[in-house]
Image (cartoon, rainbow, N blue to C red):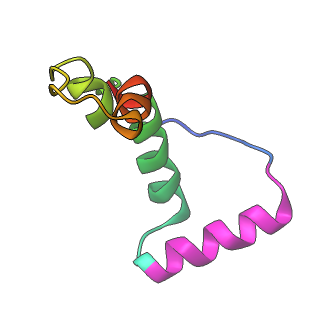
Amino acid sequence: MKKKLTITVDSELLARAEETARSRGVSLSSLLEASLRKTTAEDTPSFASRWTGRFEPAARNDARYRVLARKHL
């Protein structure tokens, strides 16, 4: 069921949003609805968070590797 919504936005933002909707061939309401759906969807983990901690450090002993390993592993 659709409901009516009144919002207040900056006039420059509104003009850009209207132009974006027009260029995509959709209504401003559809554009806002899609954005709200994306924003409120269940958070899916990022690529980095899915892979963090899944790799073992290589057996290397140089300074550059140690710095990178501390930062990324």
Q: Residue at x 33, y 36 (%)?
A: 65
Magenta stretch: residue 21 in it?
Answer: yes
Give the camera-side residue of 49 and 14: 49
55 on left or right of 16 = left
Give the camera-side residue of 12 and 1: 12
Magenta stretch: residue 40 in it?
Answer: no
Q: Residue at x 41, y 49 (%)?
A: 34
Residue 31 visible to the viewer? yes
Q: Position of residue 37 (x, y in %)?
A: 40, 38
Q: Name the outermost residue toward the bottom.
A: 23
12 on left or right of 61 = right
Q: Position of residue 64 (x, y in %)?
A: 40, 40
Give the camera-side residue of 59 and 43: 59
51 on left or right of 68 = left
Dividing the picture into quarters, in which one does residue 67 lie? top left
Q: Position of residue 56 (x, y in %)?
A: 15, 20
- In the picture, the quarter occupied by the C terminus is top left
Dividing the picture into quarters, in which one does residue 47 lie? top left
Q: Which residues are magenta?
A: 9-23
Q: Is residue 63 above or below residue 10?
A: above
Q: Residue at x 44, y 29 (%)?
A: 71
Q: Residue at x 41, y 23 (%)?
A: 70
Magenta segment, principal secondary structure?
helix
- In the picture, the quarter occupied by the N terminus is top left
Residue 41 visible to the viewer? no
49 on left or right of 3 = left
Q: Is residue 31 above or below residue 21?
A: above
Q: How many marks?
A: 0
